[in-house]
Image (spheres, helix red, strand yellow):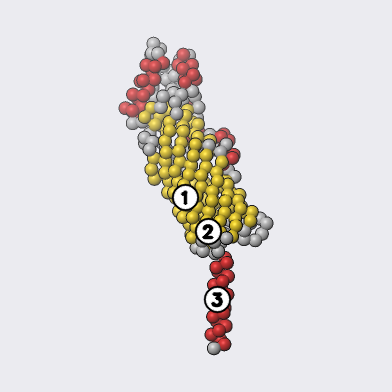
Amino acid sequence: MSRIFKISLSSLLFLAQTQMLFSDSISIQSGLSQPLIGGWNVAGTYYGEKFLFGYSHGSNLNFDAQNGAALTPDEKAQKLKINLPYTTGFSLGYLFTPNLDLRLEFKEHFYRVQSENGLEDLFFSQQIGLRTDVPLLGNEAEVWLPRQNTDKDFVEATVEKAIASELIYGAKYITPGSTHRYRTRSVGLGLYYRYFPLGGKEGLMLEPSIRFWPNVWADSPEKVAFESQFGLLGIHKAHDQGLFFNVSIGYMKTL
């Protein structure tokens, strides 16, 4: 009987310790990379014994800031300006340990995309003969042909660009100076780790994470075309968040 009692007592102590390790907690945190590109992000997370639920919302992210640090190579070569008025969504996760979890994340992103070269820039290039009639894909200054017909006015040349975009590349032409707006939705995974620099299991925390958010839906045409300074057509596809790393700072409280 004494042996059974000891085993039972040990089991109860183990369960109590496990319950403490996986006790209900909440946290609020904010990403450190978002302010670097002019925006902000705030997130809240509820941690259960084994599972968690999180929600996050970010705004005014400028992917072309910091010399285009968040742009893809193609977007940077095309000199695009990409702004996110909002990015939002929720996640469901599993706790491997109190400080390490894997999450399935569902996100929606709203984009505003413009060419760095405005209407005035392109008009000036046409006036001095630098706007090509031929829609070539390439590296701007290295691959461009001067206008073959200098009698065309700016509107006529722009209409021809729109027709060429559709017929040659199957792309929607974005009128110079205008903004292309679209939304994407992604379903991906995120691996998160929490570190408490002041010690303990709650309080101030740092939360590095690595995430993979591929697009599963977009309301943008498959291809859109922007003109460079020389009139070259660059093809833009809906921006994909893909794989990225971030660190958040926040505060956790055990309930």
Which residue lies under the disc numbered 3? 12
Residue 229 appears in the figure:
no
Which residue corresponds to the image point at 57% horizontal and 36% vertical from the top-left?
38
At 47% from the left and 50% from the top, the residue drawn is: 90
Based on the displayed image, in which of its 4 quarters is residue 184 positioned?
A: top left
Residue 246 image position (x, y, % from top left): 56, 47
Q: Residue 179 carries which label?
A: none
User: For residue 15, which quarter of the picture?
Assistant: bottom right
Q: In this view, does 150 lie above or below 143?
A: above
Name the residue tied to disc 2: 47
The foreground one among 154 and 143 is: 154
- As shown in the figure, which amino acid type bears the numbered disc 3? Leu
Q: Which residue appears at 49% of the width and 16% of the height?
A: 124
Mark 2 residue crowding within 10 angstroms, few (<14) / some (14–19) / many (20+) = many
Sequence-first tag of 2 and 3: 3
Residue that numbered label 1 is attached to: 90
x and y percent of residue 179 in the render?
Answer: 45, 28
- Residue density around tag 1, few if under 14, some if 14–19, many if 20 or more, within 10 Å: some
Q: What residue type is labelled 1?
A: Phe
Furthest toward the bottom, the residue is: 1
Q: Give me the residue at 33% from left, 31% from top.
A: 170
Q: How many marks?
A: 3
Q: Can residue 204 be seen in this view?
A: yes
